[in-house]
Image: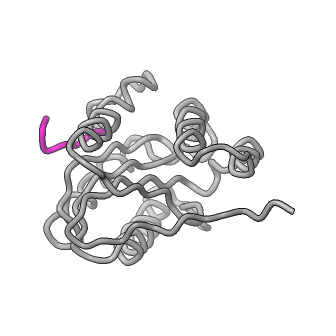
Amino acid sequence: MNKKRHLPHIDMVGYYQFVTFRTHDSIDDFLKRISKEDISNSLKQYKVDKYLDTSHKGAYLNGEVVQWFKSFLLSKDGILYNLVAFSIMPNHLHLLFKQKENIATTIKIVKGASAFEINKILNRKGTLWGKGYFDKGIRDQEHFDVVYNYIAHNAEKANLSDAKERFHGIYG
């Protein structure tokens, strides 16, 4: 019997983290199948991100929501984390930050507070964010640069007309 192995979250205050989480309604059979595939976590995340970039399922993060979410994420900078970059995709979020709190607390606050307000903006009820999140501790400068560039160009690569509005980064 093949037991599913979950790697522990890397949780080190003062270190850089790359975090991705997605809307609850974006999780469909395709994503559930990928999660069960016996492949590396990095390949799994690549396949998930590629799929989410073209999927319209759970695509609530548009228009007014993007502007609100951007302000919200920036309002936590220096308090909850030291924000480096983010990209608000229609159905998921990529964040790069230096931890100031443990990662579970940071994600719980970001997801909880944003879910309430985004649901209010959209006049909807129910679960906004999917369970869990993907995180990867940044190993070195090269890894940092790769992640930063990925986040910076994610919305452009997905051909989103408002790509510039969806990205924030301290390096432009």
- In this rendering, the answer to whether 13 lies above or below 170 is below
Q: Which residue is pictured at 36% across the width and 71% down the height? A: 11
Q: Give percent across and percent down for residue 110.
A: 37, 67
Residue 122 drawn above or below residue 42: below
Instruction: Give the image location of residue 103, x and y in percent.
Output: 36, 71
Q: From this viewpoint, which residue is outermost toward the front?
A: 1
Q: Is residue 152 above or below residue 117?
A: above
From the viewer's perspective, tell me whether residue 64 is left or right of residue 129: left
Residue 27 located within the stretch drawn in magenta:
no
Identify the residue shown where x is 17% and y is 73%.
79
Q: Residue at x 37, y 74 (%)?
A: 109
What's drawn in magenta, residue-wise? 166-172
Q: Is residue 100 left or right of residue 93?
A: left
Front in this rendered view, residue 144 or 67 = 144
Quarter-of-image position of residue 34: top right
Quadrant assignment, res 106 = bottom left
Q: Nearer the viewer, residue 19 or 12?
A: 12
